Amino acid sequence: MPEILDQARTQVLENGVGLDEADVLALLNLPDEDVPAALQLAHEVRMRWCGPEVEVEGIVSLKTGGCPEDCHFCSQSGLFTSPVRSVWLDIPSLVEAAKQTAKTGATEFCIVAAVRGPDARLMKQMREGVAAIKAEVDIQVAASLGMLTEEQVDELVEMGVHRYNHNLETCRSYFPNVVTTHSWEERWETLKMVRESGMEVCCGGILGLGETVEQRAEFAAQLAELDPHEVPLNFLNPRPGTPLGDRPVVEGKDALRAIAAFRLAMPRTILRYAGGREITLGDLGTRDGLLGGINAVIVGNYLTTLGRPATDDLALLDDLKMPVKALSATL
């Protein structure tokens, strides 16, 4: 067995201390024949430090398209030719989406808006939407509304939003290659305010943006420093009309290496399957990831791309004897 896996068994599995950047890089460079052993160790770490339950979440876009930012992977930017129209979702539709999400057994419902940061109109709609959902649906409400002010953070707390998603997307050194209309540091500042407010921090990113293996290790280390409650792990699903529309998808083995490496860097974090897993991993790879450190999934469709049917993911969890986390356990 490679030395890095022996080290990780002691450091991470037994002592609960995540791997540093150099050790994550060693994991990301493991030869193909050692990937199953890394996944098995990551699964043992997940079971020991997180337990067997899997958290299920649905997401819905409150405001789609027309975003002024230039995130090169995103078809919701108003600066690209990608075919996503600007659309607002009304409150009854938002409540109905929450109800349908709850029917899957999900405990999390995340409201997302394609904006740099929320304006007064969006915050008003959030207040009304969250109140309407809480009146009719037994589900936790999370939000992802871009960069925030201190006042907006406080307002979301008052609404009862319990978790805020704001992805760093990639490591600090590579970020300027992906986004030029705002900085990595601006995102980090919002995340600090969210943490200090008492809301749970959800922060991850996308692999396959053109970053090197070294930069993936850097990203894992920076996320570990942030210590978010949850890390959504996306794999680029290239969108036509975006600057990254012609990029190749991440190889399945590389995606699995990353899943194991991010779990061993953050042994206690909720590591969530997010966008792109369907084309990167397929059914068999999705199973391998669930047995390799993943302990949460987004079910159904994503913001602008199709996912797997929720019933398929729930059937897979049942087949793997992985219990879905109950809502009562999160309250």
Image (tube, grey):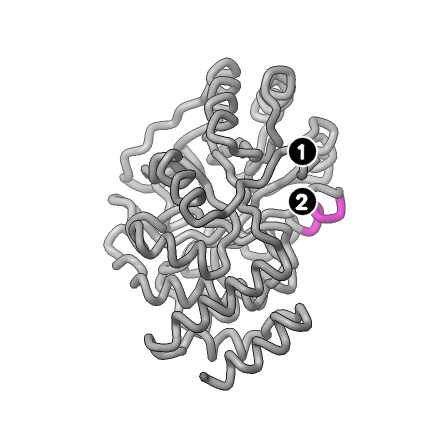
The N terminus sits in image quarter? bottom left
Q: Which label was assigned to residue 123?
A: none
Left-right relation of 149 to 183 = right
Q: Residues within 10 Å of mark 2 (few under 14, many from 20)?
A: some
Q: Position of residue 62 (x, y in %)?
A: 48, 27
Q: Which residues are magenta?
A: 192-197
Q: Are marks 2 and 1 in contact (CB under 8 Å)?
A: no
Label 2 vs label 1: CA separation? 17 Å
Decide: is 137 above or below 244.
above
Seen from the viewer's position, the closer of residues 73 and 121 is 73
Q: Residues within 10 Å of mark 1 (few under 14, many from 20)?
A: few
Residue 241 part of the magenta segment: no
- The outermost residue toward the bottom is 3
In percent of the image, x 45 and y 71: which residue is there? 38
In depth, the one of 221 and 67 nearer the eye is 221
Q: What is the x, y in percent for residue 267?
A: 60, 63
Callout 2 amino acid? Glu
Q: Position of residue 172 (x, y in %)?
A: 53, 64
Tell me: 28 left or right of 222.
left
Which residue is located at x 38 percent, y 34 percent?
Answer: 311
Badge 2 element: strand
Circle 1 sits in a helix, a strand or a loop, which is it?
A: helix
Our reading of the magenta stretch's main secondary structure is: helix
Residue 56, image x, y percentages: 51, 39
User: At 38% across and 58% down in the image, what residue appears?
Assistant: 288
The residue shown at (33%, 28%) is 85
**Which amino acid type corresponds to the residue marked 1 in the rendered image?**
Ser
Comparing marks 2 and 1, which lies closer to the viewer?
1
Identify whether 140 is placed above or below 16.
above
**Badge 2 is on which residue?**
200
Numbered tag placed on residue 328 in the rendering: 1
